[in-house]
Amino acid sequence: MRILLLEDMAVTAEVVKGYVAAAAPRAQVEWAATLSAALDQLARGSFDLVLADLNLPDSTGIATLERVLEATDRLVVVLTSEDERLMQEAALERGAYDFLHKSRLSKASLGQLVRLATLQAETFRILRQNIAELELRQRQLDNLSLYDPVTGVPNRSLFVKRLEEAIGTAAERGAKTAVVLLDLARFRGVNESRGRRAGDELLSQVAARLAQSAGRNDVGRVGGDQFVALLAGVKGRSEAARRARSLLGQCFGRAFVVGGEEIHSGAKAGIVVAPNDGADGETLLERAEAALRKAKQGSELTVLYSASLSTTTAERNRLRLALRNREFVHYYQPKIDLTSERIVGLEALIRWESRELGVVPPDRFLPLMEETGLILDVSAWSFRQALEDGRRWAQAGLRVPPIAVNLSALQLRDPSLPGLLEQALGGATESVRLELEVTENALMQDLEDSVRRLHALRALGTSIAIDDFGTGYSSLAYLAKAPVQSLKVDRSFVADMLERPATMTLVRTIISLGQSLGLKVVAEGVDGMDQAKMLRLLRCDQMQGNCFCAPVPAPELEQVLRRHA
Ligand code: C2E
Ligand code: CA
Ligand code: CA
């Protein structure tokens, strides 16, 4: 606590110093006898409180106060021996904090001022720190969500962005760009037999070799053990294939050394050539995936994409039939409030109960449905199914929390979506509330358009959650422009959080930033009690994960609700 005392009378100054020392021994008082000396001192250091007599040898009256107020943003108290009322209005109006008549100087009156100034200084400090912290966190978030934390190479979103830039520049010159999507062979085995740390180390080394061959900015990690590389300026498909094989050779031709032991790794690759195989990054990656799938099924190391690799009509028909035969069901997973430990939401997760294949998880058929557009037929089904299940539980006397339905980017952009939702909701007396989960990436594809669409869905009485948050490279402050109420921290972060300090920072950041923007933050994929405990410490609002309850069929969920009633 530093106090500047502006007073031309040495005697008064001594008295003030004495009282301050008695009331607040740690406060430090500096004395200036003229305005110019005071301004000098204010310019050189910061003071928490200025006690100012206005009538000085070099300045008098309100003018003195004005000069002092210009030089500090802290408490200024006018010290006066004149009739206080005379100047009161003028001084307070200009921003003085208070008056202290010299006849009322005492240990108590000065002690009170020091306490006030201390409080104000503290408030200033907190405000400044919060702003700095918010900015720092936003920067960390921006950075961490652009690069893969394990290998340091660009993540999927950044790669897609760079790919699209590269295609754009190439187009101006009529050049072609190849994308090589590669998947490490036997990576799971490395993780399981030598541990995760060794697995991470191997991934880092693979990334480093790829970056060396293809260029640091032209590679990316797009999945657990999947990398991409961009090859600029290829003339045609055969050159693309040749360069892809040579890239694999350079990267996997010699063994990796991890923890003193040699690991022989290899990879299969799917190759696409832009603009022939697609004009935008996402389409190209999807098609590279189709080519990679083919490579993994066969004996070839690399496969070039061709249209015939995309969904065959037979598969498409099989899924269409399954939808008609009601072979799809929703499993439900509860969301738990981390403070009250009550079930505060449910997420509907689609499963295909196939007669031939058994229960098929969504990542096995959703990509196909997306590719064929069949996913649009799923929207209406999802709404109806969730509402039907919810109403049944409500009729059985259970309190049914809001049920979340997932929407892909394609579904969100379907013009008939609001109509389908309205139709499913039926009338005004709806006992079950729906929530919609839209991924960060889907929102970002065209934020303005998304905002418009979400408003229409909100108007029908649903709430909106940002799903898989943290995997894109968007800024949260920017996303919060959309009418969203909650934020789901992507499960990959939750999985990593206890092992990687950087991820923990990211999770903590997302939680506090989300909350400061007024969003409820939900952690997904929580599969251990230690993760749940940490999330509670981080003041996360809700969690969802196998640790509390895995996704279960509707009848089982009814039992869960009953137990928790
Ligand atoms: P999502 O929306 O991120 O859903 C969460 C996924 O995490 C679910 O996978 C769930 O089973 C899984 N999960 C839950 N708890 C844990 C845990 O403790 N540990 C781990 N490792 N995982 C956990 P699921 O059901 O296979 O769904 C995968 C994705 O498929 C979903 O990811 C969602 O994007 C999509 N999806 C599922 N149902 C639908 C749907 O009806 N429509 C659309 N458009 N997409 C859906
Ligand atoms: Ca979801
Ligand atoms: Ca998710």
Image: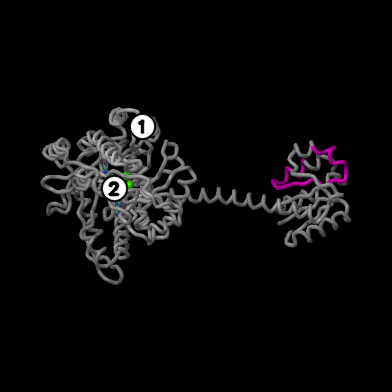
Earlier residue among tags 2 and 1 = 2
Which quarter of the picture shows residue 13? bottom right
Q: At numbered mark 1, what does the secondary structure look like: helix, strand or loop? A: helix
Where are the magenta residues, as a range?
66-88
Compared across the picture, whether 111 is left or right of 301 comes to: right
Q: Residue 38: x and y, percent? A: 79, 50
- Residue 96 placement (x, y as % from top left): 75, 42
Quadrant of the rendered image containing residue 310 = top left
Name the disc covering residue 457, or none.
Answer: 1
Q: Residues within 10 Å of mark 2 (few under 14, many from 20)?
A: many
Q: State the CA–CA distance, disc 2 to disc 1.
A: 39 Å
Residue 70 belongs to magenta span: yes
Q: Is residue 400 above or below residue 380?
A: below
Quadrant location of the N terminus?
Answer: bottom right
Does any portion of residue 461 appear in the rendered image? yes
Q: Position of residue 460 (x, y in %)?
A: 36, 30
Tell whether position 538 is magenta.
Answer: no
Residue 230 shows which numbered tag?
2
What amino acid type should be assigned to the residue bearing mark 2? Leu
Q: How many marks?
A: 2
Q: Residue furthest bottom?
A: 260
